[in-house]
Image (spheres, rainbow, N blue to C red):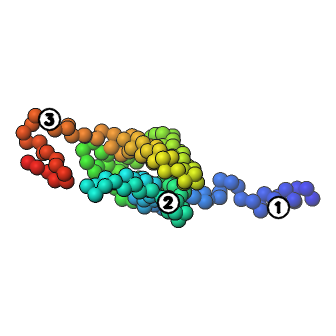
């Protein structure tokens, strides 16, 4: 009888290896960046600002419960997007794409780099999540200064990841020599030549 019960138990439960993964990445990393990561980060970055014009200075920050909730929702979206970024098998682009600028990589090379250095890519995602958790804490405390700090941390992580995987050889133009008579001179919203 024990033999029959053991045999039945083995047929009721398929082996773990035969079960498909519940995760199936559909969107590319680039799509996640455009649709979720960038949009959510903008919701945090744009929440607090000091705007100076000739008419005066305006301090922009969340003030109402609804405004704080909107920023918190952006931070939560960013947190959850980091979980999506680290799902194995996610492609960099829905389609192959060329390098965007001098020093940037094309999608094939970015994919190779992400696959070769997956622990580093995942570490950037974890650091991004930590920055977004700081933004949630700032919204809970209704602390604009803490929100700015969290936004700065998020920006540093984003830029670090992009420098590592997207445009590691970026070409930054030299700042114009102040003695060069051809350099543009900026005056109150327009360029003088």
Q: Please give the residue where the numbered disc 1 appears in the rendered image.
A: 8
Q: Please give the residue where the numbered disc 3 appears in the rendered image.
A: 177
Quadrant that contains the N terminus: bottom right
Circle 3 crowding by C-alpha within 10 Å: few under 14, some 14–19, many from 20: few
Determine whether the residue tagged by mark 3 lies in a helix, strand or loop. Answer: loop
Q: Is residue 118 above or below residue 15?
A: above
107 or 143, nearer to the observer: 143
Query: Measured from the top left, where is residue 119 in percent x and y?
Result: 51, 40
Q: CA distance from mark 3 to mark 2?
A: 44 Å
Quick check: can you spot residue 121? Answer: no
What residue occupies the far bottom of the structure in this picture? 66
- Residue 63's tag is 2
Residues under numbered marks 3 and 2 in contact, where contact means CB atoms less than 8 Å apart: no
Residue drawn at 52 percent across, 50 percent down = 143
In primary-sequence order, the first of circles 2 and 1 is 1
In primary-sequence order, the first of circles 1 and 3 is 1
Residue drawn at 91 percent across, 56 percent down = 2
Determine whether the residue tagged by mark 1 lies in a helix, strand or loop. Answer: helix
Query: Measured from the top left, where is residue 83 in percent x and y?
Result: 54, 53
- Residue 188's tag is none
Circle 2 crowding by C-alpha within 10 Å: few under 14, some 14–19, many from 20: few
């Amino acid at each position: 009888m024990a033999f029959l019960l053991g045999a039945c138990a083995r047929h009721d439960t398929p082996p773990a290896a035969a079960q498909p993964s519940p995760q199936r990445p559909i969107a590319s990393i680039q799509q996640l960046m455009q649709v979720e990561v960038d949009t959510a980060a903008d919701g945090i970055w744009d929440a607090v600002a000091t705007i100076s014009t000739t008419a005066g200075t305006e301090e922009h920050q969340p003030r109402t419960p609804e405004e704080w909730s909107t920023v918190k929702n952006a931070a939560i979206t960013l947190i959850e997007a980091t979980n999506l970024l680290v799902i194995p098998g996610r492609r960099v682009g829905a389609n192959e794409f060329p390098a965007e600028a001098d020093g940037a990589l094309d999608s094939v090379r970015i994919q190779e780099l992400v696959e070769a250095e997956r622990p580093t890519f995942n570490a950037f995602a974890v650091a991004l999540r930590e920055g977004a958790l700081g933004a949630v804490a700032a919204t809970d405390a209704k602390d604009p200064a803490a929100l700015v700090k969290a936004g700065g941390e998020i920006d540093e992580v984003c830029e670090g990841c992009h420098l590592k995987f997207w445009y590691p050889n970026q070409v930054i133009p030299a700042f114009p020599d102040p003695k060069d008579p051809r350099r543009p001179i900026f005056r109150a919203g327009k360029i003088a030549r």
